[in-house]
Amino acid sequence: MTHYLELVWERPINQGTTVREVFEVLYGHRRMAYTTIMNTMTRLAKKHLLLVEKKDAAYVYYPVLKEQEFIDSFVGRILENLFVDFFGATRAGIEALPDQEGIAYAHARLDEIMRRRASEEEA
């Protein structure tokens, strides 16, 4: 999935990407069938990760989120699930990260999660 998104993010935002363009890149690496790539991009659009627009005879896909926005959202969901289900282990795991930047990023995300959850509980 991430290979597909990475290929879409590599293109200029307003240009979009076709299944054919993704196929041409991936086929050289993995010999994937065109229909597999088409079905995967369709599923990514159904999951609201890609926007799709019909142009002439082709479907053109655009990213819904910029790469960093996607990463922040994805990491946030994972951290929230870990935080809710395994609070102590999550904190310990964060403290064990090898770089201070990673620790600071994880703490900031957890602080956001705690603030959001507290405001949701008040509402």
Image (cartoon, rainbow, N blue to C red):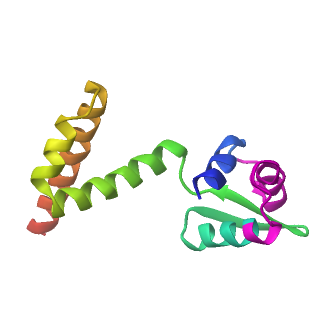
| Residue placed most toward the observer, 34 or 71 | 34
The number of numbered badges drawn on the structure is 0
Determine whether, in the image, residue 108 is placed left or right of residue 6.
left
Q: Position of residue 40 (x, y in %)?
A: 66, 68
Residue at (84, 52) in percent of width and height:
24
Compared with 93, 23 (above or below) is: below
Determine whether, in the image, residue 51 is placed left or right of residue 66.
right
Residue at (62, 53) in percent of width and height:
5
Residue 27 within the segment the image draws in magenta: yes
Determine whether, in the image, residue 37 is placed left or right of residue 105.
right
| Residue placed most toward the observer, 53 or 68 | 68
Q: Position of residue 93 (x, y in %)?
A: 20, 43
User: Farthest residue in the right direction?
Assistant: 57
Residue 117 within the segment the image draws in magenta: no
Region in magenta: 14-36
Residue at (17, 64) in percent of width and height:
85
User: For residue 120, which quarter of the picture?
Assistant: bottom left
Q: Main secondary structure of the magenta part?
A: helix
User: For residue 100, which quarter of the picture?
Assistant: top left
Q: Position of residue 44 (x, y in %)?
A: 60, 67
User: Farthest residue in the front direction?
Assistant: 30
Q: Position of residue 69 (x, y in %)?
A: 46, 47
Determine whether, in the image, residue 58 is placed left or right of residue 32.
right
Residue at (23, 58) in percent of width and height:
82
Q: Quadrant of the N terminus?
A: bottom right
User: For residue 17, which quarter of the picture?
Assistant: bottom right
